[in-house]
Amino acid sequence: SNNFLSERLGDMLGGPYAVARIVQQNAQIAPQEFVIQTASGLGVNRVTPRAMMRLLKTFKNELARNKMNFTDIMPVAGIDKGTLEGRFNTDFARGSVVGKTGTLGQTDSGVSSLAGEIQTRNGKLLFVIFNQRGSVSRFRGFQNSLVSLIQGQLGGAAPMAYLEIPLDVRLANTRITYPDTRTRVNE
């Protein structure tokens, strides 16, 4: 994820309070279950696992209305670059988890979260795992083990139907070289 971009998009929507209200209304989440101070997730934010599950379900339905799914907008573990690139990357599990991580090393004495969708031989399952007050690396190990255990209980991991499409994202004030050798600075 790009925290800078998340903050700018949040600003365009009216700031963290407005983002929270949009999420609360669209996903039918009680205000006390989704309280954010930043649009990026950095800092002290309070979201319950139940609220995150409702958000995932709402998001999945909205994507389906637009003929999309989670693999179109979130990283696929073991395949895409990012925080899930090195997770679930065995031949057995690669491509079977799509999700979003969250990591705060200092807030609440260490926070790690993982939410998304897993694919098993018996179908797909949404999941939310929030850990706090401990070692982020241990939390990640626990998350990996729990997801793998669930997949095992449901017949084993199965790769999602997914076609990797690499995107080259550039922020303002970057140099772009075009094929005809012109150079332009985005501002």
Image: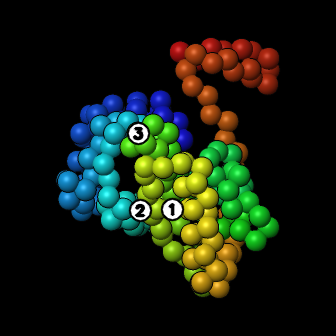
Local crowd size for mark 3, using a 10 Å CA cut-off: few (<14), some (14–19), many (≥20): some
**CA–CA distance in space, label 1 to label 3:** 22 Å
Q: Amino acid at mark 2?
A: Leu
**CA–CA distance in space, label 2 to label 3:** 24 Å
Looking at the image, residue 23 lies above or below residue 143: above
Please state the horizontal and vertical placement of residue 60, each as a whole percent of the image.
44, 64
Mark 1: secondary structure? strand
Local crowd size for mark 2, using a 10 Å CA cut-off: few (<14), some (14–19), many (≥20): many
Residue drawn at the location 43% of the way across and 49% of the way down: 133
Residue highlighted by disc 1? 116
Q: Amino acid at mark 3?
A: Thr
Q: Which mark is residue 79?
A: none
Closer to the chain start, of discs 1 and 3, is: 3
Cβ–Cβ under 8 Å for marks 1 and 2 = yes
Mark 2: secondary structure? helix
Residue highlighted by disc 3? 107
Local crowd size for mark 1, using a 10 Å CA cut-off: few (<14), some (14–19), many (≥20): many
Residue drawn at the location 67% of the way across and 75% of the way down: 157
Query: Is 91 on the left or on the right of 144, as rendered?
Result: right
Q: Which mark is residue 56?
A: 2
Q: Amino acid at mark 1?
A: Gly
Location of the N terminus by quadrant is: top right
Labels 1, 3: front one: 3
Please state the horizontal and vertical placement of residue 36, each as a whole percent of the image.
30, 43
Residue drawn at the location 26% of the way across and 47% of the way down: 35
Please state the horizontal and vertical placement of residue 183, each as a whole percent of the image.
71, 14
Residue placed most toward the observer, 28 or 128: 128
